[in-house]
Amino acid sequence: MSDGVTLTRIVRGTEPAPADQINTTTRGPWMVNVLTIDPRMTRGHLEATYGPDLAKTEKTTDLVRSSGALAGVNASFFTFTGSAQYPGDPVGLGLFGGKLLSEPTQRSDEVDFVVDANSNRVLMGKLSWSGGVQNRQTEATLPLKFINHPPVVPGACSGLTDQTQCAVPGDVVEFTPEFADATPSGAGVEVVLDRHGCVVRTSTTRGTTLTGGQTSLQATGRDAASLLQVAGQGCVKETSTLVNEQGEELPARKGLFGVNGRYRLTADGQIVVPAGSGSFFARNPRTIAGTTRDGKIVLATIDGRMTSSVGTTMAETAAVADALGMHDAVNLDGGGSTAMSVEGALVNRPSGTTERPVGDALVFMNTRYRGGLG
């Protein structure tokens, strides 16, 4: 493929599985595609990309092509069918070129995959986030709940056009121009800020178009009145802090990219995936990202839900990661989202009738990182 980058296809089992045994057979077959990147041998870098805007979905092959990448796999868990208007909204961490566009959730099963495109060094683990705004003159503060996720109007106040009259807590959300063509509309308050954090305009309803450099703050419920008090005029200082599992701050510096996964598969060479039940832990197509003991980056897909490749349970997925030499590995979004593209072509076989559009992808660019989004 390229210096320091290899694609390996592994087939285990030769006989197709009986259709009624796909979920129960332990004999396979399995089709595994493995992309291995050796940072010592390549001049390229790994990064994450999300397409035209964060809220849309794109096929992995299209994300690889449009970014000019050599190869890539689907990555984060995303809203999908939970939002017809914003299906690509990441459910968890979304970090692109040092810009945090989606905060990690508080879910115990979220495990994030972060790569520094300048060095191809990888960090895996559960990140946490806190953010807020402070009026520079009055020093009044207000915590942020989300970044680039539509706020929810409290049910008790859903009939109120004027959310400042609501006595029930709502959401306070920051929106950036990368989210969508316009910010989410509806009841609530919105304050638009320029690149210096100074108020450009305020509105007692939500929904506007942001220009480059602008951000907005939206609030619903009781927090609508609080937002007007703290950031309704003047200038504000915004804070946003990512912290790793050790409680150390992770500065969102240029070149840092991060996507969200569910469950650590291996850690320090040990299989650590927990036991579980239900459809998520059952046999499914899988996408894995990990690193070897000597620093190679490994991206792998396991086809599933077919007689030609049955997929893997979570326990089996961890075993595959371990067998592939992944000293540390995380389970990315899988199921119908599982896809690997190389040189613009789909190299695995998705479980659906067509390739599913996804929220973002991890892509390998065959050049040194020079800044900007791929």
Image (cartoon, grey):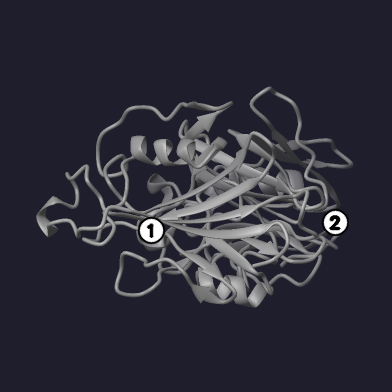
Q: Is residue 95 left or right of residue 43?
A: left
Observer-side mark, 2 or 1, equals: 1
Earlier in the chain: of badge 2 and badge 1, it is 1
- Residue in view at x 51 percent, y 58 percent: 8
Write down the residue under mark 2.
Answer: 198
Coordinates of residue 266 in the picture (x, y in percent): 51, 32
Tell me if mark 2 has few (under 14), some (14-19) or many (20+) residues whose alpha carbon lies within 10 angstroms of its own.
many
Residue at 62% across / 37% down in the picture?
124
Asked if labels 1 and 2 touch by Cβ distance under 8 angstroms, the answer is no
Residues under labels 2 and 1: Cα distance?
Answer: 34 Å
Q: Amino acid at mark 1?
A: Gly
Q: Callout 1: 10 Å neighbours few (<14), some, many (20+)? A: few
What type is the residue that disc 2 sits on? Cys
Q: Secondary structure at mark 1?
A: helix
Residue 275: x percent and y percent? 33, 27
Disc 1: which residue: 82
Q: Is residue 317 above or below residue 3?
A: above
Look at the image and tell me whether residue 115 can be seen.
yes
Q: Quadrant of residue 215?
A: bottom right
Query: Is 19 drawn above or below residue 259 in the view shown?
Result: below
- Of residues 287 and 197, the one nearer the viewer is 287
Name the spot of residue 362 as percent of width and height, x first: 60, 58
The residue drawn where x is 58% and y is 41% is 112
**Looking at the rendering, in which quadrant would you find the N terminus?**
bottom right
Image quarter hosting the C terminus: bottom right
Q: Quadrant of residue 175?
A: bottom right
